[in-house]
Structures are given as structure tokens and as C-alpha cells.
């Protein structure tokens, strides 16, 4: 599936260590992209987010890195800087270019080998793998060590992952299968896409079907037991007592519509609604939920700024929610954590008996 790479000028690359269960994903915009960011979680790990505020100087960035490894994983952005510097891409200064690379991380140290984390070399490798082709999903890049549903403790966790989705602005409310699948016939169209790394404390909900897709799962009883199933916050204190704060959902939304920094920040803010629709609970004290917005600034809209930003931000929330659901649906079992496909197989086997 193309997903976010359906946006012209956006490339995605992954690198990971499948044995250590960690990795990083780079979203490259070699031509530059106007950027905004919104941080809602209370345990974020980020880089260059202050630079994206409307009042600050630099207008465009060249990449966003999403990484595992907790704060250690921010080192992967150094490799992305080195790659871009080698291409002569970055903010021009009298003494050379300075690539502007935003980054955010998830805490995945508890699933694989905590001594192995994404570093500069892995970030560089992700750049070498970057393309505008179909974007892999599930246990790939920064989604390699992602898990969800840890609100009851890590023994109830399921596998999270990386997901992506994109659609046309005219497709608002029409996120049926296939809308975001290809890149053909997009000439002259305004596109909005999202890429999410889902490593949430809470449960993942399909907001269109109204059901839990992945989350706190009692493996013995074969049922969901988290807040998504009960729609209450009664289990929050259990997570706090375990100290297993291994969470955070991080994402990039992108559009080819023309946005300034103020507009990009507003779209990032509105896109956070997609996390709230698809994750219960979202934006907690144990998550560092962060959403970047990138505008490749190719397509003008109506000229009515408030209306344009509202439309793009609304659709950004929709495609981000879809990307979150796709992330767990594409995941596969790892590190002892079952995946959506495993519990669906169990259900089918049970139905046959």
C-alpha cells in the first residue's frame, strides 16, 4: 500500500533489528516541507519540535524520524542528517547546509534486547531504503518493537506496529477499503496521508466498526479486558502500580496542499483527534503522543484559509485513525506478544468446535 508515499515528494524508509526488536522509520521530504507538530502525551521524546512553532525562523524541514529505543533512539536522526548533508540538502548557511530533521521516539526497550537501540547507522540505512513506492506495514521500522494494551500490565499486551493510509480531500468520510491503496489518477488532487507507529498504553478501537481490534488481552480467557472493552478508566491505577510505562504513539500526517507553519501546526493539532478516536485512552501521563504535519505545498486550495485548514485537519484525523487500525492489523506476533491475526485464528478455531 502506498499510504503516505502517495503524497508527491514524500519518501519513506525503514531499518530495523529483527532479533533485538527495535528499529526506525524516516519520512524524507528532500524538496523541503513546511512543518508543524502537536505533542499531547505527557512523556514525549522529541527533537526539533520547537523549531516548528510558527514564531520561529526555519520554514521547511527535510525529514522526520520515528524511532524505537526511547530517548536513545533520537541518535538515529544524526544518521539522517549525515545522509542529507551528503546530498547537499538542508537549511542553507554561509558555511554549508544544515539538514533540519525532526524526530520522536517510542519506548520499546521491554520487548527485545534493551541494550540494542536505533543509532545513527540505522538512521542512515533507513534513508538508503527510502522510496516513494508502497510502504510496508506492521513489524517494520519503528513499529518492530511496538506493543499496545499495556494498561493492565505487560503480560496483557498485544503486538503493535506501523500503519499508513492516504486519501483524497474529496474522499472525506469515505475510508472504505481501497480508497488509499494506489497512487494513480492523483494528478491535480489534494491528498492527505498519515503514518503511525502504534505503541499505546491503551486499546486500539476501530472507530467505524465500534469494536476493540487490539489491546489488553487475557490470553487464558481469550478476551479483551482493557478500557476499550469496558469503556471505563477503572484499570488505570493498575498500570501505574506496575511501572511498565512502555508506551507512546507517534505519527506523521502529510499533504500536498499549501500550508504555512501556522496552518501545519493546526492540522497536527486536529490530527490528534484521530488518536483519540482509535486509542482508548489516548494522550495519557504514560504516553508521549506526538503528531507531525508536513506540507509539500504543491496544491492551492479555495483561498479561504480557515475553511481549508478545517477541511485538511478533519481529514487528517480520519486518515490517522485508519493508519492506527492498520498498524495493529498488519502486526505479527513477536517477543511473546500475540497479534491480531493470532486471536482471529483462535476465534475461528473455537467457532469450528
Image (cartoon, rainbow, N blue to C red):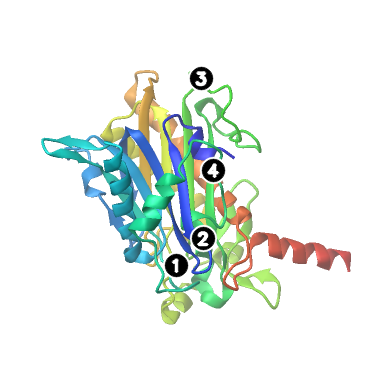
**Residue for badge 1:** 108
Disc 1 to disc 4, C-alpha distance:
22 Å
**Residue for badge 2:** 144
- Please tell me which residue lies in front, 261 or 105: 105
Label 4 residue SS: loop
| Residue 91 position in % (x across, y down) | 21, 37
Mark 1 residue crowding within 10 angstroms, few (<14) / some (14–19) / many (20+): many
Mark 4 residue crowding within 10 angstroms, few (<14) / some (14–19) / many (20+): many
**Residue for badge 4:** 135
Disc 4 to disc 3, C-alpha distance:
20 Å
Mark 3 residue crowding within 10 angstroms, few (<14) / some (14–19) / many (20+): few
Label 3 residue SS: loop
Label located before the other in sequence (4 or 2): 4
| Residue 225 position in % (x across, y down) | 61, 71
Q: Quadrant of the N terminus?
A: top right
Residue 187 is tagged as: 3
Query: From this viewpoint, is residue 289 visible?
Result: no
User: Is the C-beta separation of discs 2 and 1 under 8 Å?
Assistant: yes
User: Is the C-beta separation of discs 4 and 3 under 8 Å?
Assistant: no
Label located before the other in sequence (2 or 3): 2
Amino acid at each position: 500500500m502506498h499510504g503516505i508515499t502517495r503524497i508527491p515528494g514524500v519518501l519513506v524508509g525503514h531499518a530495523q533489528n529483527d532479533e533485538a526488536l527495535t528499529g526506525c522509520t524516516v519520512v524524507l521530504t528532500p524538496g523541503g516541507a513546511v512543518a508543524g507538530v502537536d505533542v499531547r502525551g505527557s512523556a514525549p521524546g522529541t527533537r526539533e519540535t520547537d523549531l516548528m512553532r510558527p514564531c520561529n525562523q526555519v520554514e521547511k524541514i527535510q525529514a522526520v524520524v520515528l524511532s524505537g529505543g526511547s530517548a536513545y533512539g533520537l541518535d538515529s536522526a544524526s544518521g539522517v542528517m549525515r545522509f542529507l548533508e551528503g546530498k547537499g540538502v538542508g537549511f542553507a548557511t554561509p558555511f554549508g547546509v544544515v539538514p533540519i530533521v525532526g524526530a520522536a521516539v517510542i519506548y520499546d526497550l521491554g520487548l527485545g534486547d534493551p541494550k540494542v537501540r536505533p543509532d545513527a547507522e540505522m538512521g542512515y540505512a533507513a534513508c538508503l531504503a527510502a522510496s516513494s513506492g508502497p510502504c510496508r506495514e506492521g513489524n517494520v521500522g519503528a513499529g518492530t518493537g511496538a506493543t499496545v494494551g499495556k494498561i493492565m500490565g505487560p503480560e496483557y499486551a498485544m503486538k503493535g506496529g506501523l500503519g499508513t493510509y492516504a486519501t483524497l480531500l474529496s474522499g472525506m468520510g469515505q475510508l472504505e477499503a481501497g480508497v488509499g491503496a494506489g497512487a494513480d489518477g492523483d494528478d491535480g488532487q489534494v491528498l492527505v496521508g498519515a503514518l503511525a507507529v502504534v505503541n499505546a498504553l491503551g486499546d486500539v478501537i476501530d472507530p467505524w466498526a465500534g469494536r476493540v481490534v487490539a489491546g489488553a488481552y487475557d490470553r487464558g480467557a481469550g478476551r479483551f479486558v482493557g478500557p476499550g472493552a469496558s469503556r471505563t478508566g477503572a484499570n488505570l491505577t493498575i498500570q501505574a502500580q506496575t511501572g511498565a510505562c512502555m508506551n507512546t504513539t507517534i505519527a506523521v500526517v502529510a499533504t500536498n496542499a499549501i500550508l504555512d507553519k501556522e496552518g501545519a501546526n493546526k492540522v497536527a493539532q486536529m490530527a490528534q483527534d484521530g488518536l483519540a478516536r482509535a486509542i482508548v485512552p489516548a494522550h495519557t501521563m504514560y504516553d508521549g503522543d506526538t503528531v507531525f504535519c508536513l506540507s509539500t505545498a504543491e496544491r492551492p486550495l479555495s483561498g479561504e484559509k480557515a475553511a481549508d485548514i478545517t477541511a485538511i485537519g478533519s481529514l487528517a484525523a480520519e486518515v490517522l485513525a485508519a493508519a492506527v487500525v492498520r498498524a495493529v492489523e498488519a502486526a505479527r506476533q513477536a517477543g511473546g506478544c500475540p497479534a491480531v491475526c493470532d486471536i482471529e485464528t483462535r476465534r475461528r478455531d473455537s467457532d469450528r468446535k
